[in-house]
Image (cartoon, grey):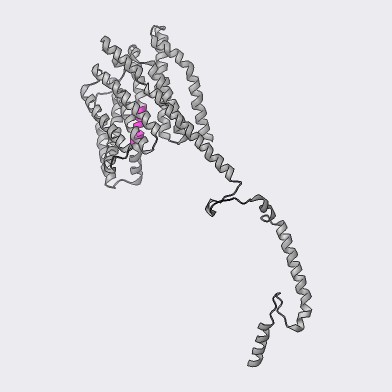
Amino acid sequence: MASSLLLSGQALHARRPLSGCSFPCAAQSLVSASCHRTQLRQRTIDEVYLNNAPFSRQLVHRFKPVLSSSSEDAHLTSEEPEKLKSDKTFEQWDSMTAKFAGAANLPFLLLQLPQIILNAQNLISGNRSALFAVPWLGMLTGLLGNLSLVSYFIQKKETEAVIVQTLGVISTYIVMLQLAMGEAMPLPQFIVVSTVVATGLVLNFMKYFDFLNSGMWRFWEDFVTVAGLSTLPQVMWSTFIPYLPNTALPGIIIFICAVLAVIMARMGKLPDKGAKFLESASGWTATLLFMWMAVAQMWTNLLNPENIKGLSAISMLLAMLGNGLLIPRALFIRDLMWFMGTSWGSVIYGWGNLICLYWVDVLERFTSPWPRVTVCFFQGVGFWALIIVISILFFLFH
C-alpha cells in the first residue's frame, strides 16, 4: 500500500504538463482536444472582453502619459488646463482687488484734508462755533475703530488695509486736535485719546515688524477688547444725550463685564463658545464703532442743521470713494465684518451725509457753496453704485 502510494505520487508529480492538463498518458489523448477547445474559448472570451471593456482601448487614447519628474507630480492631462485656468483666475482677482484696496489709500489720505483746512480757517477767523458741527464723539468712535482695525488687519496680513486704517487714525487725530484747540472737545478726554493713539500705533507697528512678544500683544488685544466693548455702548448712549440722561452707567457696566470675561478667558473658565465670541469681539466692536461714526454725524446734522456748513462735502465724497474701493477686496477674501464696515461707510457716511447737504441746499436755495458742489458730486454716485452691485453679484454667484 505504501509503495503504491509512493508510485502514484511519483507519477503524479513527474508527469504534470506545463499546459495545465495533468492527466495520465492513457487519458491524455482523449482530453487534449477538450483542453485545446477550452484554451481557444478562453482566448476568444478574453478578446471580446478587452474589446468591450470600458477601461481598455478607450482609455489608451483618453489618458495620455504626462512627463513628470516624480510620480507625485503626475496628473491627468484633462485636469491640467482646468487647474491652471482656476489658479490663473484666482491670481488675477487677487491682484485686481489688491490694487483696488491700494488705490483706496489716496481717498483716505485726502479724506480729512478738506475738513482740516476748513477747521483751520474757522480757527483763524475765530468762528469756533462752526467746529461744533463735527461731533468729537463721532470722531472718537471712528478713531478707536480704525485703531482696532489696524490690529485686526495686521493679523490677517492685509498690508493695504493696514495702511488705510493707519491713515484714518492719523487724519482723525488731527481733526480731534483742532476740536480740542477750538474747545469743541474736552481737554481731559483729548489727553487720554492721545495716550491711547500713541501707544496703539507703536505696538501695532512693532507687531507688524515682529518686534513684539506674544505676551505684550495679548495684553494689547485684551485692552482693545475691553476698550471697544465699554466704549461702544457709552458712545451710543451719549449720542442721544439731549433725550437721554447724562450718565456713564452703560459704559461702566459693560466695562466691568468685559474685564471679568477677559480674566475668565485667560484662566480657561469660559466655555468654547464664549472664548470664540470674545476673540472676535474686538474686530466687531471696531467695525461697529466705525459704523457708529456715521450715525453720530447724521444725528448731529438733524439736531443742528444750521451748523452743517462746517461739514466738508469733499470729505464725505472721499469717504464714499475710499470705502467703495475696499468692498471688492472684502468680498474676495470673504470677510463679512470688513464688507459690512466698508459698505456702511460708503452708503451711510458718504451718501447719507451728502444727502443731508443736498437737503440743506434745497432749503437754503443754493446759498451755501458746499451743497452746490455736492449736487455735482451726485453725478458720479451712479457709477460707484454700479461697481458695488457688480462686485456683490459676482462674488455671490461665482
- Please name the residue shown 48% across and 16% down the image: 379
User: In front: 108, or 176?
Assistant: 108
User: Could one spot residue 347 in this view of the protein?
Assistant: no
Q: How many marks?
A: 0
Question: Which corner quadrant holds the C terminus?
Answer: top right
Residue at 42% in and 26% down: 104
Write down the region rendered in magenta.
Answer: 282-290
- In the rendered image of this protein, does residue 359 appear above or below residue 190? above
**Image x and y of residue 334, in percent:** 45, 36
Q: Depth check: 227 or 181 in front?
A: 181
Query: Is 60 situated left or right of 284 in this image?
Result: right
Q: Is residue 193 magenta?
A: no
Q: Position of residue 326 (x, y in %)?
A: 43, 29
Q: Is residue 288 magenta?
A: yes
Measured as percent of width and height from the top left, residue 10 is found at: 66, 86
Question: Camera-side residue: 335 or 15?
Answer: 15
Q: Position of residue 192 (x, y in %)?
A: 23, 28
Q: Quadrant of residue 134?
A: top left
Majority secondary structure in the magenta region:
helix
Say which residue appears at 34% left-offset and 17% top-offset.
115
- The part of the image, by quadrant, that contains residue 122 is top left
Q: Is residue 336 visible?
A: yes
Give the side of residue 199 with respect to residue 107, left or right.
Answer: left
Q: Is 61 drawn above or below residue 6 in the view shown?
A: above
Q: Residue at x 48, y 31 (%)?
A: 96
Which quadrant, please, contains the N terminus?
A: bottom right
